[in-house]
Image: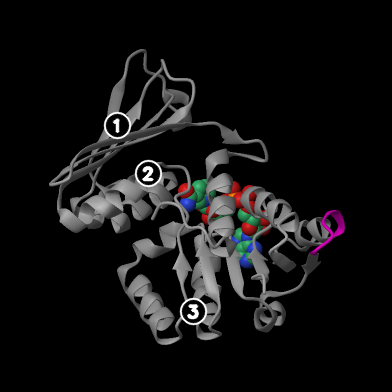
Amino acid sequence: MVLMITLGIIGCGAIGSDVAKAADEMKEIAEIYAYDGVEERGRKLAEELGKVKFQPVDVFLPEVDVVFEAASQQAVYEYAERIVEAEKDLIVMSIGAFFDDEFRERLVEKARVHNCKIYLPSGAVAGLDGIKAASIGGLDTVTLVTTKSPEAFGKHFDRRTILFDGSAREAVQLFPRNVNVASCLSMAGIGLDRTKVKVVADPVIRFNSHKILAHGKFGRLRAEVENLPNPKNPSTSYLASLSAIALLKKIVNPLQIGI
Ligand SMILES: NC(=O)c1ccc[n+]([C@@H]2O[C@H](COP(=O)([O-])OP(=O)(O)OC[C@H]3O[C@@H](n4cnc5c(N)ncnc54)[C@H](O)[C@@H]3O)[C@@H](O)[C@H]2O)c1
């Protein structure tokens, strides 16, 4: 029998609606329930897409197999524990919530006890597969270099300027918009305290870029993405939506490519 799943979506903004549209066309997804704190966003999606029904999370939770969160860190704190306690798999986009060590450890332990999975899509970066594999043999350094135009930081520089150079833990306090990428990379590799982050303002670049540099027993890794913004939300990279859709396809596909 072909694997069919029912999907719940929390957050019907840029990423949530991209994922809902893709899921609506996936034959392995039987039904989709969507919820948004702004009710008309969820209702609009339900009107546009055949498989989507608008329902509050507590109502749809017993019906679904997998819940996809693309709302906010607040939503992760609000729903994640209830989702895993209900033995449903969970995909989290607001990965910054995992920056809270105590919350992350409690949630992961609950998922273990309730035998379900928590998936963190690679989002706006490339190279996490290599970092995960390399970490098995031992990583010496992992650095994330985020480069944006000076205007993105509300500044004006006529040359490349390093705004921050320190640990991922410090970086996310000063640059909270880096929190998803820095948290995910740190968890994949050597943690928030040993992962280094450089934040750079460069008047030459046209697109926001995230570059991962790593050294270890495996050799050397260098992976860079120049991100185009999501047309629905310019502060979100389009690749973030695509990584979530790719993860959903991986969940329902018998052929698993990459780690
Ligand atoms: N992992 C990554 O690489 C990555 C990349 C981009 C964005 N993100 C994160 O993904 C999330 C979604 O991004 P987006 O661009 O789609 O945002 P968006 O603002 O376009 O959409 C978010 C939607 O969620 C709803 N929402 C917020 N809090 C809610 C709550 N507590 N309950 C119900 N609905 C709620 C909002 O009303 C909004 O419609 C954000 O937290 C963002 O930081 C992660």
Q: Quadrant of the C terminus?
A: bottom left
Q: Residue at x 53, y 83 (%)?
A: 87
Viewer-side label of 2, 3: 3
Question: CB under 8 Å between callouts 2 and 1?
Answer: yes
Secondary structure beneath dot 2 equals loop
Q: Which residue is mark 3?
A: 81
Mark 3 and ligand 1: say if the CB distance to the nearest ligand atom is below 8 Å. Answer: no
Query: What segment carries the magenta color?
Result: 47-51
Measured from the top left, where is residue 40 in percent x and y?
A: 80, 59
- Residue 210 at x, y = what percent? 38, 35
Mark 1–mark 3 distance (CA, rounded to whole Å): 36 Å
Q: Is residue 33 left or right of residue 174?
A: right
| Label 3 element class | helix
Which comes sooner in the sequence, label 2 or label 3? 3
Using the numbered discs, state the Cα–Cα distance from disc 2 to disc 3 in whole angstroms. 27 Å
Hey, which residue is sitting farthest right in the picture? 47
Which residue does the numbered mark 2 point to in the structure image?
175
Q: Which residue is mark 1?
A: 163
Coordinates of residue 75 in the picture (x, y in percent): 56, 67
Q: Secondary structure at mark 1?
A: strand
Which residue is most to the front? 1
Local crowd at mark 1 within 10 Å, few (<14), some, or many (≥20)? few
